[in-house]
Structures are given as C-alpha cells and as structure tokens.
Amino acid sequence: MIRIPLLLAGAALALPAHAQDAPDDRDIVLTAARAAQPADQTGQAVTVITRDQIEQRQTVAIADLLATTPGVQVTRNGGIGTVTSVRIRGAESEHTLVVIDGVRVNDPSSPAGAFDFSNLLSSSVSRIEVVRGPDSVPWGSQAIGGVVNVITEAPTEGLHARASAEYGYADSVFATGGLSGRSGGLSGALTAGYLRSDGISAAANGSERDGYRQFGATGRLGLEIAPGIGIDLRGYYADSRAELDGFPPPNYMLADTPEYSRSEEIYGYAGVHADLAGGRFKNRLAFTIADINRDNYDPTYGSAPSFYGYGRSERYEYQGDFTFNTVVRAVFGAEHEDSRFTDGSVSPHAGLTSVYGELIVRPIEMLTITGGVRNDDSKDFGNHTTFSANAALALNTGTTIRASYAEGFRAPSLYERFSSFGRADLRPETAKSWDAGVEQALLDGRLRFGATVFDRNIRDRISFDSGCTFAPGVPCYVNIARTHVTGVEAGVTMRPVDGLTFAANYTWLEPLNRSPGFDGLDLQRRPRDQWSVSADYRTPFGLSLGATLLVVGDSFDDAFNTNRLDGYAIGGVRAEFPIGDRFAIYGRVDNLFDERYQTVSGYGTYRRAAYGGVRLKL
C-alpha cells in the first residue's frame, strides 16, 4: 500500500526542481508537432525538463528523473547500467519512442525494438521533452505510449565551459565537462562524461557487487552559409560495460555470476536547413544513423560472447513548415527508414517509407486546433494510416483547456518477424487514445494546478502463443493481445515566496490486460498509484536545499498477477552552496529512509547512498 504518512511528511517540505506537469506558457515545445510551438498552443500533455532542473536534482541517470514525471513508470534489473525500462501511461517500454538530437534511437536488435535507458546519463543532456500519449502522426512507429525527446547541449553566443565531478557510495566517480560557443555563422559544442561505480549486486540475494563503467561524448557543429540557410552536424557516442548476474546451474535461479555486457552506441545527424519566404517557409533535409552493438559474456564458458546483437537504422527525411498567415500553419514531411540487425543466426532488414502532414489553425487568438494524418508503407505489412487531432484553449483568466485524440502504431520488429520464433505475416500493433485536461494559473503564475484524464486501447498486441499453425505446441509471436488503460494525472506547482518552489504530481492508472486468458488482470509492473513531491529553497545567502519523495504503489511482476511487488517510498535530500560566481559544492543522500524495495522481482536496488561533488562554470 502507498505510504500516505510519508507522503504527507514529504508534502510538508516539498517541491520539485523536477519536471513541471505543465510548462510555462511562454515555453516553446518542439516534440508534440515535431516543430517549435508555444506550450499553450498544443492540446497534448507535455512535460519539459531543463538543464537547470537536472543540475538542481544532481541527476546522474536520466531514468531516475523520468521516474518522478507524471504518467511515467521506471523499472530496472539491478543497479545502474542494467536493463532499464520506461513506460508512459501504462504502455509497454517498446511503445516509448526515444529521440536524441533528432535521431530515433530505439534498438532494432532488441526483441521488440525498445530503447534501453540504462546507458542514458545526464552528462550532455540540456533538455528533455516528454509527450504523454500516442504521437505517431509526426513521429511514426513506436510512439504509442509517448515520446521522450532528448536534446544535448547546444551552443550559445560567446564561449562557455562547464565541468563537474562527484564521488560517493560504492566508490562511484562521475565526471562531466562541456565546451560550447558561437561566433558569427559558426557554432559548436562538445561534451564528455565518465562514470565508474562498484555498484550493487544485480541479484537481490547476491553478495557480489556488479560494477558499471561508461565513457560518453556528444558533439554539435553548425554553419550558417547565408541568413536562414545552414548545415547541422550532431554526434553521440557511449561505450559502456556492466557486470550482471544470471541463472547458473543446477538451480537456474537468479544468483551471483561473473557475467557482464558491453555496448557501444553511435548516433549521428547530418542535415541542411533553409528558411525561405522571409522565414515563413522552413525546410529541413537530413540523414540520421543509429548504430547499437551489444555483447554479453559469461567467462564460465570461455572468452567468446555468449550473445551479441548488432542493430542499425538509417533514415532519410525531409520536413517543411509553412506559415500561411497568423491563422494557418502546415507542418509536413516524408521519410524513409532502413533497419537491420544480426545476432549471428539471422540478419534480416526492412524498409519503411512514410509521409505525414499536420495543419495548425488558430481561428481566434485563444484557440489552437491541430489535425494530422500519416501514411506508412512497407512491403512487409502494407499501408498503415494514422490520424490525430488536438485543441488548446488558453483563456485570459489563466485557464488552459486541452483535449486530444490520437492514434499510434508499432511495426513488428525484425526479431518478432525473422527470429526462430518469428512470423513474417505479423500486423502492426495499433492504439487509439483520447485525453482531456485543464490547467489553472493564479497569482501571476506563482500557483499552477491541473488535471488530465486519459484512455487508451491497444489492439493486435504482439505476444507469445503456443498455438502456432506452422508448429503446434511451439511458442511464436502472434497478434493476439489487447490492453486497455485509463487514468488520471494531477499536479500542482507553487512559488509562495521568492526562492521557494514546491511541486507535486499524482498518477492513477487502471492498467487492464484484455488478452484471451488474462482479461481483467493488471498489466505487469504497472503500479496503479504513483506520487511525487519535491521542494527546493534557495536562501538569501546562496545555499540551496531540496528534497524529493517518490511513492509507488503495489503492482504485479507477472501477467498472471500471482507475484506481487510491494509498494515503496523513496526520499532524498540535496544541498548546493556557491563559492563565488563560478564555483559550487554540492551533495545529496538518496533513499534517505533506507527503503528495501524491488521494481523487478528478484533484482536488487540501491539502499541509502550519499554523494558529494563540485561544479564549475566559465
């Protein structure tokens, strides 16, 4: 059960430096329509996380910050660096589309094409936008639950540098650095990060620590050839090594083993942009690449990989954004994706060609209506058409009313179609969703509160089934599963006095499995209740103090709802003190209450842990 007393205690301190449930209306969001748009002109639910919030929360793993975001659930198979899944509004992890600097980075070598958040660290991240709800019209396949758009550090005018280093629990070292600048038509940014930790035992009953190490770097280069016309280059690299636990004989139960994994992620973007007609007609032409190599090793059986998966996707895309006048705007595009993977036994590939268009209409200043359609064409599963519509009404009273209807789809993955369990005739999974919400700003924006209700049905879910027509009794992938999720997201942010910020959000889900044999059972690892409260206060002499409390309700670890995962409450405190204008020292304590909990049955989680560090900005 949810620990209400702890929640109330946390609310007494509270507030969030974390993601706001509703971005300030002056903010510009990029993700919902895949084009820059004021937040109060989109009818979709969007959460924005800034670099200031990342540093204020002293975040290392981005997934830990997403866990306190409305409508988002996070599970991890052990310590940092182990498989980490992010689910939005009760959808599957493979229904979360992840974009880094314009590159779709979902892994074509994973069974369902999900992105593993285990290696996504905060070193280079400048901004995150989370769209809650299907958004397949501008983004295509996999955006059934929503979209997580990660934007790395971008250059600003002049030369800027930053660096930080921290040390803490389990001999952990986390160091980051960045250099960026802009002069005339040339701009560039370079960031790097290094993390090393002895970690914890991935197996909850283990005693051997499973460590983690990552080196990562990002780079940006921009050149304005003429006013409004330029070239954009972006790159992302991460090399990671994580120690694991496995299922050794003779018991084949999760226990300490010497297994480990290595992964290399390379993402790249090369594009040109041209703003024509006095800036009213924006054009973008780009090529993107995502290359993910994963190797698992078990030294018990030799030095060769026990498993490897190499996935690669290449995209060619054009996008146009034409503003006819103050009333009508059109966003449209075409793209082609080639994806492939190999695991040593098969090396399939697939192509997908897509076109989409969105019309954004403002018949009156307060009202924005957006409608869109997308068509995806594959020689394997044919044509698939997706529709969406949303509206936002921003009244002069500080009230914003939003509503949206959206469809989403996920194309069957290469593994689901071509592995030894695959079927080439699989159909795409499809979703239909609606939501409606209201937000209210009072006291010149010092108080904001709101709530959103949502509902989503997913059909043709791809799942294992033992009734394969080509081999009765042998499991294979088939389109037999259905799910229905309804829920409510509510949030409040307050700034009662200068320097003090408070925020809280609550998510309630009814995550029902509607598949044959499971109808009416809860979807696994989907807690029905989740709270987050945070508070941050900056004293007049510069000292910053903060606290966060995450409370997660009970859930089930299995589809049959026989293995219950108890709810838990995780509290943390933090502080930062500036020394001069450019230097600061900081520290935090995570899991302050030393809570014992699991997000995946049998896998360990961190107990109380303390960290301290220094930060420099030039």
Image (cartoon, rainbow, N blue to C red):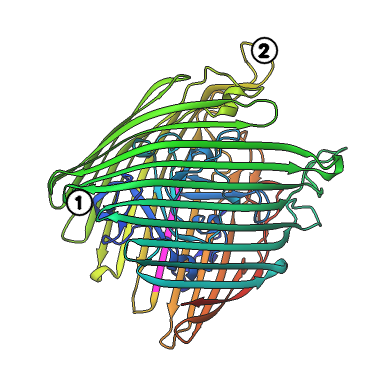
Left or right: residue 449 compared with residue 124: left
Towards the viewer: 283 or 456? 283
Q: Which residues are magenta?
A: 501-509
Residue 504 colored magenta?
yes
Name the residue rendered at 48%, 21% in the picture: 427
In this view, 69 is above or below 383: below
For badge 1, the amino acid type reads Gly
Magenta span dominant secondary structure: strand
What x and y, as percent, mark residue 126? 44, 61
Residue 192 colored magenta?
no
What kind of element bears circle 2? Answer: loop
Q: Is residue 304 visible?
A: yes
Left or right: residue 161 compared with residue 327: right
Which residue is disc 1 drawn over? 279
Towards the viewer: 565 or 133? 133
In this view, 526 is above or below 189: above
Name the residue rendered at 60%, 68% in the picture: 175
Name the residue rendered at 53%, 76% in the picture: 615
Give the mark nearest the N terminus, 1 or 2. 1
Towards the viewer: 388 or 341? 341
What x and y, as percent, mark residue 141? 44, 34
Q: Which mark is residue 534?
A: none
Left or right: residue 104 compared with residue 558: left
Left or right: residue 359 compared with residue 497: left
Badge 1 density bin: few <14, some 14–19, many ≥20, Cα 10 Å: some
Which residue is disc 2 drawn over? 472
